Image (cartoon, rainbow, N blue to C red):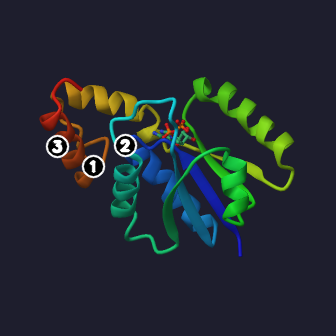
Amino acid sequence: MARAIYPGSFDPATYGHLDIIRRAAALFDEVIVGVLNNSAKSPLFSVEERVNILENITKDVPNVAVTSFSGLSVNFARSCNAKVIIRGLRAITDFEYELQMAQTNRVLAQDVDTMFLTTSLEYAYLSSTTVKEAAYFGADISKFVPEYVVRKVEEKYRRNPAG
Ligand code: ADP
């Protein structure tokens, strides 16, 4: 059984993330999306909310599971019995950081490999940060994120207009 994890912040998940999830799900028997519980960042959505969003937008893909984790991705991979970490590469700006992380992970865990999927061109510019910024200033974000996520982001900014 070939299993992969797809770790990230997903604050919130965008069509870019969803594209990577679907394509990874076509390559592996099972893909476990891992929402990183990172105390250093102050996210818009709690870990539970991000897991809920991902579960909702991936419910039509049967071999995808969503969970949260803390600590190292390689340890999360091992705990899932997965040999592969999936990451998405958007542009050259992602490359240096991603390469460094993949190499570090490789030294930490020789039994786990990182696989990069290049972004579909239509989503190459998308990031959770720019989506939040656009929403904060009242822009229509329905081209960037699924309808369910549009609603969740709008709810956040309505309830907490200071951001
Ligand atoms: P992190 O904080 O770990 O970078 P993100 O949620 O920003 O978490 O991203 C998780 C993964 O998804 C990363 O590998 C990132 O490069 C990838 N990713 C982010 N946005 C896109 C996109 N628009 N298209 C494809 N992959 C993306």
Q: Residue furthest left?
A: 158
The secondary element bearing badge 2 is classed as: loop
Instruction: Tell me how far mark 1 sits from mark 3, CA to CA.
Output: 10 Å
The secondary element bearing badge 3 is classed as: helix
Q: Which amino acid type is marked by label 1?
A: Val
| Left or right: 32 in relation to 80 | left
| Left or right: 127 in relation to 113 | left
The secondary element bearing badge 1 is classed as: helix
Upstream in sequence: badge 1 or badge 2 = 2
Instruction: Tell me how far mark 2 sits from mark 3, CA to CA.
Output: 13 Å
Picture quarter containing residue 102?
A: top right
Position of residue 146 relative to residue 28, above or below, is: above
Q: Are marks 2 and 3 in contact (CB under 8 Å)?
A: no
The numbered disc on residue 155 is: 3
Residue at x-position 69% and y-position 57%: 77
Question: To which residue does mark 2 refer?
Answer: 12
Q: How many residues crowd mark 3 within 10 Å: few (<14), some (14–19), many (20+)?
A: few
Instruction: Tell me how far mark 1 sits from mark 2, CA to CA.
Output: 7 Å
Q: How many residues crowd mark 1 within 10 Å: few (<14), some (14–19), many (20+)?
A: many
Q: Which amino acid type is marked by label 3?
A: Glu
The numbered disc on residue 149 is: 1
Picture quarter containing residue 136?
A: top left
Residue at x-position 41% and y-position 30%: 42
Say whether mark 3 is within 8 Å of ligand 1.
no
Q: Quadrant of the C terminus?
A: top left
Q: Which amino acid type is marked by label 2?
A: Pro
Asked if residue 53 can be seen in this view, the reply is yes
